[in-house]
Amino acid sequence: MCEKIKKVNSWLSAVFADQPVPQFEVNMRTVDVLYQIAQSSEARCRDTALLIEDIKQKTSEYRAEGAHLQDVLVQGVGLSCASLSKPAADYLSALVDNAMVLGVRETSLGCFMPAVNSLTNELLEAEKSNRKLERELRALRKRLGATLVLRSNLQEDINKTVKCQAVESAKAEERLLNMDFVKAKAKELRVRRERAEAQLVARNMDKSITHQAVVQLSKDVNALKQEIIPLKKKLEPYMDLSPSPSLAQVKIEEAKRELAALDSKLEMNVDFK
């Protein structure tokens, strides 16, 4: 880790020269990324230096060969640039320019034609690549338009959601306030009820007169009344019988006793309550 940091700092100092190195967060990821970039940069610089040296060497070789050919033309044939006519010098300059553009070392037709064919193929490939890039660019523009529309819709949804969230938050806050109020009120009522019950206990209040006791007494009375109804129905047939003093008297006495017992039971329950 320390070796990588030293390497990165050295590379950054060499890259920025006299300018201050920008501050960055030092961690494992940033150091690894900068270390890889530094290695790639140094490797590219080495390759560039080797390429420059190769170009310098080829330049010196071309110059030596040009001087040799010039000596051959001047000494062997007696031709020089000064002895050529204006059209010949122009043709020679055009041949040299074409050779440099085509990247050939000779100006013969056999060297020019392959170079021209190669450049033509490169041009066709470039045009083909250009058409492909144009299609991809159109597709990207369409997708970009759809993405922008989707982004606009999402932004609208976000804005609506934020507004709804604000409204719901206000409602929730209001509910919390109401809940706190209800809790406080319920606590107050519970305290008041406990206080009232304590006062009733202190005054020795009879529980039989409470609302719950009265309600239970009413239920018991209704139940007894329901029990009396079938007994009254039993007496109804005897009301229509012909007079039979002995039997009727017996039945009447039995019914009276049952009715009296029920009345007594009802009175006892009422008094007990």
Image (tube, rainbow, N blue to C red):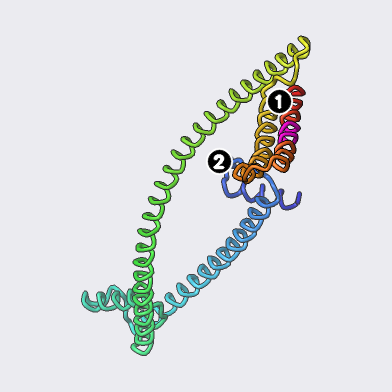
| Mark toward the viewer: 2 or 1 | 1
Pick whichever, 207 or 201, lies toward us: 207
State the mark number for residue 19: 2
In percent of width and height, residue 185 lies at 61, 21
The residue at 69%/18% (across/down) is 193
The residue at 36%/77% (across/down) is 128
The residue at 52%/28% (across/down) is 174
In percent of width and height, residue 91 lies at 26, 78
State the mark number for residue 213: 1
Badge 2: how crowded within 10 Å, few (<14), some, or many (20+)? few
Q: Quadrant of the C terminus?
A: top right
Q: Amino acid at mark 2?
A: Gln
- 43 relative to 202 in the view: left or right: left
Which SS class for mark 1?
A: helix
In percent of width and height, residue 269 lies at 75, 27
* Residue 257 among magenta residues: yes
- 169 relative to 112 in the view: left or right: right
In percent of width and height, residue 98 lies at 33, 77
Point out the stretch of residues depicted in magenta: 255-262
